[in-house]
Amino acid sequence: TPLQMEDACIENLVMPIKFFGSFFLIHGHQYLFKRINIDCTVIKTCKKMGIQTVAVHSDVDANAVHVKMADEAVCVGPAPTSKSYLNMDAIMNAIRVTGAEAVHPGYGFLSENKEFAKRLAAEGVTFIGPDTHAIQAMGDKIESKLIAKAAKVNVIPGFDGVVKTAEEAVKIAQDTGYPVMIKASAGGGGKGMRIAWNDEETREGFRFSSQEAASSFGDDRLLIEKYIDNPRHIEIQVLADQHGNALWLNERECSVQRRNQKVVEEAPSTFLDPVTRQAMGEQAVQLAKAVKYSSAGTVEFLVDSKKNFYFLEMNTRLQVEHPITECITGLDLVEQMIRVANGYQLQHKQEDIPINGWAIETRVYAEDPYKSFGLPSVGWLSQYQEPLNLAYVRVDSGIQEGSDISIYYDPMISKLITYGATRAEALARMEDALDNYVVRGVTHNISLLREIITHPRFISGDISTNFLPDIYPNGFKGHELEVDERRELLASAAALYITTQLRSQRVLASTTPMECRHWELCLELGEECHAVEVTKSGNVEIDGVRLEVKGQWNLASPLLPLTINGTNRMLQCLSRDASGRIVLQYLGTLFKVRVLSKLAAKLNSYMPEKVPEDTSSILRSPMPGTVVAVSVKPGDTVAEGQEICVIEAMKMQNSLTASKQAKVKNVHCKPGETVGEGDLLIELD
């Protein structure tokens, strides 16, 4: 049957995919898509159903994967989303030109825009999603909360109206009791959300949240709720048709987050028992029926330590993390959405929905995880290789080698999904998949993802939305090497260095040095220096400890599979140069090792050291983005921690502050300017 997990999940797992929004049609007619990751998913399902597809794209996405996959493609404008993917006139024109009869909005941009759904209905075009009433009711957090209350769904205490001013926000926060959550009424995806613990943070949160909400959703209305400290974020997938039938398709645990945006998800949750799961599922269905919902949707809850759960919001679209629900149920949610939109009844009853196995999803971002757990990175993917050679691995992406990661869109590279009969099996496969994932040309967060899924607290299921700040209170620093792991890394670097030397000698047709079967080296890792001896047979001795290193030394491959004292490891060599510097990705983290002969190490001690730049009197941009505001001018005196400027990167606003009390010497930026990572913004005396 379709719900037999082994066959259904294996079929799903071989489908690549990516992110953003999409558009299309039904029953052999044309469908229109908008932007990458989810577009590729929808296009694949449409092809399986015999449906032709049309991709819409901005000019910078002309060579995107979803454009190549679709039967037709239409450019809807330049890179800025307001002029392309949010440009309803351009998209409606694309529908008319191609004769598309239905639109799938994916999970970005116009996916929850009631005006867009109304315009489609006026043109007689089918919207692959709920009707405008459900979109409007659930898209407005204030109205959705009132509807949830009436439907007897547990809700979070707070103010149900619109907060109009910062001072009004402070009064409401004081009445509600700190901490509070300030959030965009029309928001989602972590945009326009701030936690406030006092009056000053409430004022600041009101300002930033309203600006982000206006930028992301064109609606700056805000509401305030009681912030439930240290909760779990668990959501219920629902599926409903136009005939009054509705199902809940179990839960997804999405507690590991940064800046209110999900990083790792899994299905099912380690926390829920059958009774709580059923109660949450039934309330989610109650809410769906209360708004006559039809399509796939997600009801999100916050769950406290005592398994009390509270309605957070309902997403009237396909969720980014929907693949893990597909894995444990065997359902293709895109296919179900198309069937529902075409008027069919649901194929299954509640008792047909299984929990078969375990699925994990990690979100691979073009981000620097060492900066606030992930500030955006941009660039060109000079090398890109997905781990699709591994069993039970699915990669939802819409990029390829040579793709450009720009400042205009979300920094997600892909969703990496692994499936197993048990959670331990799914986690082990995720670890292997991350080690085998090659991403070059942009900074990425694979090191953070690997540390999360291998951390003892995550493995035990002891997680909450505060997981990252709890585990890394001083910020993420990468993998901290144990003694044995340090030896493994050094042994690998030494063996790689000798292999490189031997290959060079063969290329240069030098035979005499090939007789050497023993090398004495000096390896530098951080501030440490280690004496290393290497033999041609693969034995490496580090500080008196011997290790056996075996591997397939294909120096042209980005992946280096090794066996070190019987343990299989997958390393990646990102770079190596003639001076002995080698950059290795080991256990997910990049490490810089320098390998020198004993003589070279001795002579290196005479080399002058480069003096690092004094950054205490300058402010450089920590990420590429757009300057939203500059709060100072030359001659101003700023206090430590005072806001100097605001940078918006990929729809998130970041306040940059002074690191010390000083006088402003020069200002090198102005509102509206685009800046790159490391660009000089402010000089201080």
Image (cartoon, rainbow, N blue to C red):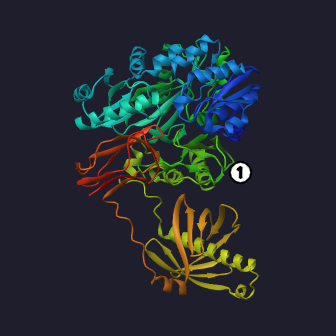
| Image quadrant where residue 477 sits | bottom left
> Residue at 51% of width from left, 65% of height from top?
591
> Is residue 318 toward the left or the right of residue 528 in the image?
right
> Residue at 42% of width from left, 37% of height from top?
232
Q: Position of residue 324 (x, y in %)?
A: 59, 37
| Image quadrant where residue 55 sits | top right
Circle 1 Cα neighbour tier, 10 Å, few/some/many (<14 / 14–19 / ≥20): few
Q: Position of residue 420 (x, y in %)?
A: 63, 44
As drawn, 671 above or below 387? above
Residue 683 in view (yes/no): yes
Q: Nearer the viewer, residue 340 or 424?
A: 340
Residue 346 in view (yes/no): no
Q: If the image is split into quadrants, where does the C terminus sit?
A: bottom left
Q: Nearer the viewer, residue 432 or 616?
A: 616
> Is residue 656 toward the left or the right of residue 95 in the image?
left
Mark 1: amino acid: Asn
> Is residue 56 toward the left or the right of residue 303 in the image?
right
The residue that disc 1 covers is 389
